[in-house]
Amino acid sequence: MGAMDSVQGDSGGATGAQALYFDGLSNTRRPVTIAFSDQLDIRQDGSIVARWAYSDIRRSDSPAGILRVACLSAPPLARLEIRDATLAAKLASRSTELDAHHLGRRGVARIVGWSLAAAISIIVVVLFGVPLAADRLAPLVPKALERRIGDAAEAQIKGLFGAKVCGDREGQAAFSTLVNRLHAAAGFDGPLESAVLSTSVPNAFALPGGKVFLLKGLLEKAESPDEIAGVLAHELGHVKHHDNMRALIHNGGTSFLVGLLFGDITGSGALIFASRSLVEASYSREAEEGADTFAIEVMRALGRSPKPMAELMFRVTGKEGSGFTILSSHPLTEDRLARMGKEERPVTGAPLLTAEEWKALKAICGSAAKT
Amino acid sequence: MDQMSFIPQVPPPLPPAQVSFTGERGEFRSMVTKGAALELVTFGFYRFWLATDIRRHLWANTSLDGDSAEYTGRGKELFIGFLVALAILLPIYLAYFLITIEAERLQELASIPLFLAFYAFGQFAIYRARRYRLTRTIWRGVRFWMDGSGWAYAGRAMLWGLLLVVTLGLALPWREAALERYKMQHSHYGNLQGKFDGRGWEFFKNAWWLWLLSPIALLVFPALPFLYAEFKAREWRWWLSGIRFGGVRLESTLPSTAFYGVYWSVIGWSMLFSMIFGAYTGACTGLVASISGVSFEQVIGPNSQTSIPLLVLIGIGYLGLALALSTVMRVYLQRDLWTVVLASANVHGIEAAANVRAGGELASALGEGFADGLDVAGF
Ligand SMILES: [Zn+2]
């Protein structure tokens, strides 16, 4: 009883305002006195304006030297401000839950823990879930949509290279013969569109919706029909495996998920880019190996060797050295050459093109194709 | 009584209310350094809590007429807002992708309107994010709040943006004035309605020559920070001086050279840290080369055999650089800039803000979530 009385006596006896009170309904600055009874009594001009239970009192943000508190059972914006240090300490000692709602070390540790869990689950999804989803979803993509994406990509690529379709009639006939034989040996139905494009870039590619393009630059470097056949079989492998759609889903999913991490950290762009490239490169390397496997099977079915294709690649890219392969998106040509060499079997089938047809194919883009 | 008391007394004009900032710089610095480290550890997820801590610090230490403000937003709200925004944005992104394919197929430039749609969405996010921040701002137990429509704002921003492009940027002052008028008209402090009195013409008069000089500044490196600092200072002064809440009038005396120090400090620190990072990368490369016994050219040459330990070392250095730079940016561009601006501010007619009745609803943090998801920032 004594302690309580003396505290009350303290404040009751003081005449000047000890605190400022804002009732949360208007912004009127109300000079008040406070008294510590079984609750906190807030008085203005002698009459009680509010009574706050100590366990409901919470600290609000304030500059140094001011204790600002709110009360759970009062209007949410009602505030009491105490600028006197000893009085503030007295209130703080009674309000046991004063800092209960603050984040504190435990709260931060919880955020860190959950973030790590989220990050790990995102990484697991990127490494395992996204490839799985890509593999499962790619065959389910409606053919019409796949074709549209292919058309859009074709228009863009043709514009990029400024390339035209090579239209020499005899050359085209030879090209169709080759493609049809591969198509039949590959044993898959579905439309296939193929053409030679007149650009000196030595490459070949497949687009969604069954489009296969051979670029003039690669044709010029080729020395036998088997070399070109192997490359086309490889591209057919990409078509058969829906690799474009798989890559699209995979890269889209990876970009989105990796983008969830890091947020606005300065320079996070580079981090995001690096981790994305790493994941995507390894995924496309797998796709390339799968297409190689497919090419080997097709060439075998035709009774031809897959090795010339690797030799052509080697001629184009040259020796690449035994480098760091995590970042490269395709198997090293040496590794390919070694693999194709291992898969080599004696040739049993008839040549895929006659000498005349081969000559016509080489000249499909006009006189420049002469070697 | 003498006759003096019969003469109606004209009260002397009240001095402008005091605006001050009392936060410790060291406290802020250690807060953002720790926050940046936590951001790295949490793969960026801590950003919501750090942004909240920064605002709480700035608000609580800013006092007007003797009473400091308070920021009642919380990191968790921002995080949830981000998740909800994500759930809404994901299907939109997918639809965007599909429509782009269709459009590209028809014509190469046909996808531009879609880009514009995203721009509009970004403007909407800016409006809603401001609304969130305003409704979390408390002064004397009464909150600020905002009504109006984010889409109406986005529409205005788009039209003015078009004009901006057509006039090569000359319409900027009028665009800012119009958009700010919309935002301020819909801003309230309790039952006091906001208003923006700034005129595009005033801003233009003040800054048109910067527009003329901008092509030169893009070519001559040291000119650009000066020009930008001049522009920003004039913009802030004009903006602050146009703000009204009922009879309360803001005014700013910000000198146009006010931001030189802030910007050059950021540039200086960034250059220093980048140089340290460069030296560190060089040292690591040399170290790895000497340990693994390959020649220097083999490590960095065109046919380099990139080694994993080197990548890891550089990655660590890079994270350190990111940490240092983000701390510098926050200290100078958020805290110091704020204190410079506040020091220039005067508030007239604060007595009009006595006995304001509380009002307004809390807004959700969805807008901030969109702003985060779309990577837009605004004010
Ligand atoms: Zn391939």
Image (cartoon, rainbow, N blue to C red):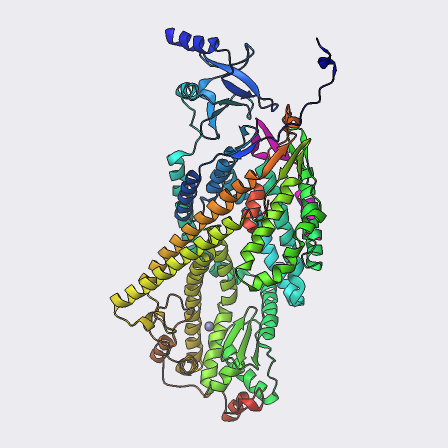
What residue do we see at 53% from left, 79% from top?
A214
Q: Name the image quarter holding the C terminus of chain B.
A: top right
Q: Quadrant of residue A102?
A: top left
Residue A325 point in image, percent of width and height: 36, 68
Span of residues in magenta: B135-159
Of residues A15 and B165, which is closer to you in this image? A15
Q: Name the image quarter holding the N terminus of chain B.
A: top right
Residue B372 point in image, percent of width and height: 54, 47
Locate residue B185 relative to residue B220 in the image: left or right. right
Is residue B125 visible in the rendered structure shown here? Answer: no
What residue do we see at 62% from left, 29% from top?
B15
Locate residue A174 relative to residue B6 in the image: left or right. left
What residue do we see at 50% from left, 86% from top?
A220
Residue B172 vs A93, above or below: the answer is below
Residue A273 point in image, percent of width and height: 46, 60
Of residues A231 and A370, which is closer to you in this image? A370
Of residues B235 and B117, which is closer to you in this image? B235
Q: Is residue A211 magenta?
A: no
Is residue A245 visible in the rendered structure shown here? Answer: yes
Of residues A286 and B363, which is closer to you in this image? B363
